[in-house]
Amino acid sequence: MAHRSALITVMTTAAYKAARRLVRDFGEIENLQVSQKGPADFVSTADRRTGETLRTELARARPGYGFLAGEAGEIAGTDTSNRWIIDPLDGTTNFLHGIPHFSVSIALERDGALVAGVVYAPIADEMYWAERGVGTFVNDRRLRVSARTTMADSVFATGIPFKGARDHALFSRQLGAVMGVSAGVRRFGSAALDLAYVAAGRFDGFWESDLYPWEVAAGIVLVREAGGLAGEISGDDKMLQGGSILAANDSLYRPLGVILRDVA
């Protein structure tokens, strides 16, 4: 059985507790009160409640740590070295439409470096977790990225720009280029889970633009600790500032990046 450190125990416990209400709300989706913040960008009462639970549980276990979260923004802590980066509900649109593919995501950033990540899929009851130097696991099973070496045999995941987002034309070129050389492209609607699936070898790679740090921070740790590579599509290593991400195993990372950059 995989040994979870005190840090991972804190993170997984918070994710489990926060997800309980999500599961109940998902079963009564028609009764949720939902406000529309922008085109295809919804914030639900479930999202807000989950965020409050996460912040309460994490603050109780690690007083003084700061927070960066989609629904609450940045909250400074007295401990300036450590910051939680959380997404209470990644895949909100799926959740609100009754699609059981969404997650709770927690990452810890220490002195500017990502050191631990947790992504929990409550409907599937899959807890993905990773800590720097320890590896990546789902529940208690060790994970590794896929061993595929050719684009023609590989399946990739991405996120499709929604109404109001920019660069629809660029995405169409990227999608066409990858479709033309691969075994397929999937769009599931949760970047955190897409990255977890890359870590698990289910997807051979993932790319998307215009993402927020809380959507990818935990997943970056999962991929890297599973033996994969993660960076910006441009090749830089500023995913938490750059807004794009490319993740894959070490055989496919470079060729996938070349394809995406060539059509930019």
Image (tube, rainbow, N blue to C red):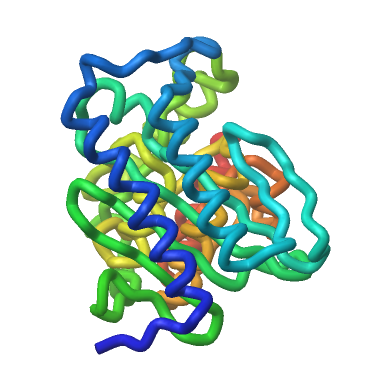
Name the quarter where the C terminus is drawn: top right
Locate residue 224, reporting x and y percent. Answer: 50, 71
Q: Is residue 64 left or right of residue 219?
A: right
In-front residue for pair 102/57: 57
Locate residue 186, reporting x and y percent. Answer: 27, 40
**Residue 252, visible in the rendered structure:** no
Report the number of numbered marks.
0
Locate residue 130, reporting x and y percent. Answer: 45, 73
Residue at 52% of width from left, 76% of height from top? 7
In-front residue for pair 45/224: 45
In the picture shown, does residue 1 fall above or below 93?
below
Q: Residue reaching furthest front?
A: 60
Name the quarter where the N terminus is drawn: bottom left
Residue at 48% of width from left, 19% of height from top? 41
Residue at 29% of width from left, 29% of height from top? 95
Q: Is residue 15 left or right of residue 166?
A: left
**Residue 66, visible in the rendered structure:** yes
